[in-house]
Amino acid sequence: MKLLAHIILLIVMMNCSGNSQVILQEQKNDTIMKYRTLNEFEQYVILNKGTERPFSGEYTDLFEKGVYACKQCGAELYTSQHKFHSGCGWPAFDNELPEAVLRVPDADGKRTEIVCATCKGHLGHVFEGERFTPTNIRHCVNSVSLVFKPAASKPYDTAYFANGCFWGTQYWFNKAPGVIKTTVGYCGGHIENPTYKQVCAGNTGHAECIEVVFDTSKTDFRTLAKLFFNTHDPTQVNRQGPDIGEQYRSEIFYTSALQKQIAGELFVELYKKGYDIATEITAFSKFYPAEEYHQNYYEKKQGIPYCHIFKEKF
Ligand SMILES: [Zn+2]
């Protein structure tokens, strides 16, 4: 586990030294994607590497909050945070979501083509050194290669955090503005329907974890992930204070490419502040709610956590 965290850290740091990309090398979700049937013009651009006329695409001047996905396969590629106005006539992004876009030498021998990492559909070209934004990168993408998903279309979102005894984790997340519901349980292991006793024995691979459902109009994943880091010691490996064991490890289980990106950015931010972060960032697979007597433990006991002390780190 520690080794994995260090590998992730090294990769994050290497990429951050050159630009603001955060690329994490965990296993991808084995999601089976259904490809969209493309019309003639979409085939011309996405399959045959054509280019739409400048200023003709529907997303060139769109700056609404949301995510841009691949038109052909639906994989999320860019967020509105990455988008900027280049004046070139095509949508421009100064960064991509982790592992979303592949760079390949263009057939013209000069430029660098960008394609969707999942379906290899043509997106456009990437240019460096133009000094449009601090990352110094411009992904010049055909609107027709993209589908925009407005942020407002998803009123609720879910996040999964593990940071020691889940009683204490839940204590803090229950107090967070915009949180609708929390449930404590188990994530990241290798057996079905684990019990508390099995997880405590330390050989199921699960972490004590919390499921947080939140209102995206009132809070966001970045705010909640900061609360996660602020309410435990993320430098401890496989323990949190007096609670020792793999089930008490620090881990974020991301459910989208955007969550993964944000978790990576916060990881790097804390590392740069001198924290030797042990937090793992892993693709979410399955959550098993814990037994009822573990739910809202501190509310029932009217107590406060012994192991989750708030300390502002950002
Ligand atoms: Zn694709």
Image (cartoon, rainbow, N blue to C red):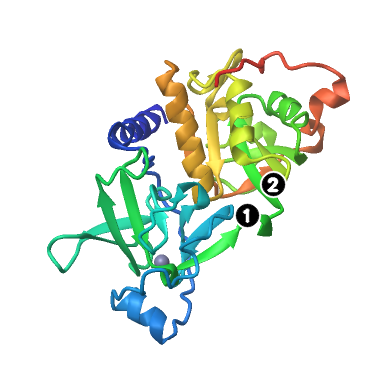
Q: Residue furthest front?
A: 87
SS type, badge 1: helix
Where 263 sits versus 233, above or below? below
| Quadrant of res 218 | top right
User: Quick check: 253 left or right of 86?
Assistant: right
Q: Which mark is residue 216?
A: 2
Percent x, y of residue 15: 31, 37
User: Can residue 283 be spotted in the picture?
Assistant: no
Q: Nearer the viewer, residue 175 or 16?
A: 16
User: Can residue 109 be spotted in the picture?
Assistant: yes
Percent x, y of residue 116: 36, 63
Question: Label 2 sits on what residue type?
Answer: Thr
Q: Nearer the viewer, residue 161 or 198?
A: 161
Question: Label 1 sits on what residue type?
Answer: Ala
Q: Which mark is residue 151?
A: 1
SS type, badge 2: loop
Percent x, y of residue 26: 40, 44
- Distance between the alpha carbons at the discs numbered 1 and 2: 8 Å
Q: Nearer the viewer, residue 43 or 142?
A: 142
Percent x, y of residue 190: 53, 45
Disc 2 packing (10 Å; few <14; some 14–19; many ≥20): some
| Quadrant of res 149 | bottom right
Kindly check if marks 1 and 2 are in contact, taking CB atoms under 8 A apart as contact. Answer: yes
User: Quick check: 220 left or right of 1?
Assistant: right
Where 12 sits versus 91, above or below? above
First in sequence: mark 1 or mark 2? 1
Q: Residue furthest left?
A: 109
User: Quick check: 184 left or right of 118?
Assistant: right
